[in-house]
Image (tube, helix red, strand yellow):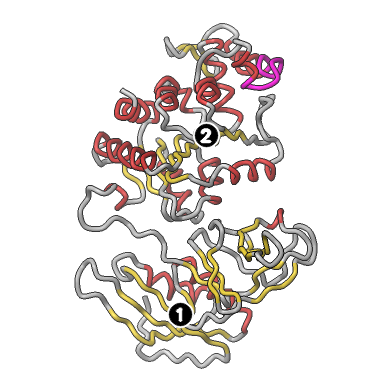
Amino acid sequence: MQDTSLRRVDAPHSTTVAVTGHLMDTGILARVLDDVLEYGGDYLIESLDLGRRHEDESRALVRVSAGEGDLLERIVMRLQTHGANPVDPGTATLRPAPADGVFPDDFYSTTNLDTCVRLDREWLPVDRAEMDCGLVVDEVDGGAGGRVVVRTVPVSDVRAGAAVVCGARGVRVEMPPAVARGEEEAFGFMSSAASSEKPQVVLVRQIAERMREVKAAGQKVLWVGGPAVVHTGAAPAMVRLVEAGYVDVLFAGNALATHDIEAALFGTSLGVDLAKGAGVPHGHEHHIRAINTIRRAGSIAAAVASGVLTGGVMHAMVRAGRPFVLVGSVRDDGPLPDVYTDVIGGQRAMRAQLPGVGFCIMVATMLHAIATGNILPASVPLVCVDINPATVTKLADRGSAQAMGIVTDIGLFLEQLARELAP
């Protein structure tokens, strides 16, 4: 953080933003000031009220300036990712979308933090926070009893003429979720972004307890999984978790479902015998033969109903009536008939499953973890478990600041978690 005692802020466009929270020990204030400079602006700290005790919050008022009004708007949008808001937010500016799939040039680019928009002096909560979208104002339940709602809309889904919030005026975001402070009992391992050395048994118990709390509150547990769930022999543990009611929704790609079905039909994953850990003759064909079997049946659910598929994670999800969304990639074999090959269609299907999600756990997948993190509100706690610490780091670097992780073998982790939740 640079010394501001002699700074001058005399650019023609300026506004004062307020930021409140544990500003010093979390580094939020430093990030706010660094971003102002990085984006080509300048700042002056007008006041800084530091909390006296460890649990007290601090508050800073920072005057931000820029040579152009448009640049100042972009800086303010950036600062809102840290929970910094203009002291005088004004009211929102609405402009019509010029065409399907196109926002106005100065559209407000959203964060994943809870957000409100002020229209005619009234603050309206945004329906669901999601990063890198626009804000569209709609009137629903038309007539005299109609009401106005504000929704996050991805650019691919905006329609010509939609009322889009533009600029940063009239927009307020909440502070990022606080890291657990003080006593460690409340999911205390979240004090670090990725853990490879903390006692895994303790971490698993904490995750299990959080999942119980989420279920008791009537919320859903979302899982995001990669094929290593099957490769490591952890599919039976995952099945137990499904049957115990701790897998409400599953996001994955073609690979997890394919190798899970391969294991159910042939006892192999990528041609390796899961009981012996050795390759089998013609095992390299098993995954494509598994795909062909399901394609002949018509779908995973149809294969379960007809008795073709009698075990595995996907079988358990169908039997439990739990939804899953499989979104493919250009490298997929087949794919399975349930896989979305249109990625925009896949995104929409994933978003449709998010209402009611209170906790997300990601295991052994980088691309699907990042994709899911990008559409989740920051208010939904998420844990990423992977043998590769870079997976957790990349997830956080791409905007999912609430992501916390455990670096460990997926097979061991899932077996321990199943023992806690589904003994």
Residue 375 position within the rendered picture, expressed as x and y whole percent measured from the top left:
55, 50
Disc 2 packing (10 Å; few <14; some 14–19; many ≥20)? many
The residue at which mark 1 appears reads as 17
Disc 1 marks a residue whose amino acid type is Val
Q: Earlier in the sequence, mark 1 or mark 2?
A: 1
In terms of depth relative to the viewer, which is nearer, 407 or 215?
A: 215
The image position of residue 193, as x and y in percent, is 36, 50
Residue 377, image x, y percentages: 49, 54
Left or right placement of residue 175 versus residue 169 in this view: left
Query: Is 5 part of what is drawn in magenta?
Result: no
Q: Is residue 93 above or below residue 261?
A: below
Q: Is 223 rendered above or below residue 175? A: above
- Magenta range is 292-301
Tell me what residue is drawn at x 59 percent, y 86 percent.
Answer: 67
Q: Is residue 140 left or right of residue 366?
A: right
Residue 250: which numbered mark, if any? 2
Q: Mark 2 is on which residue type?
A: Leu
- Disc 1 to disc 2, how far (Cα)? 40 Å
Say which element carries label 1. strand
- Answer with the quarter of the image where residue 72 lies: bottom right
Quarter of the figure that contains the N terminus: bottom left
Q: Residue at x 39, y 59 (%)?
A: 177
- In x, y percent, where is residue 248? 48, 34
Q: On screen, 231 above or below 87?
A: above
Identify the residue shown where x is 45% and y is 85%. 63
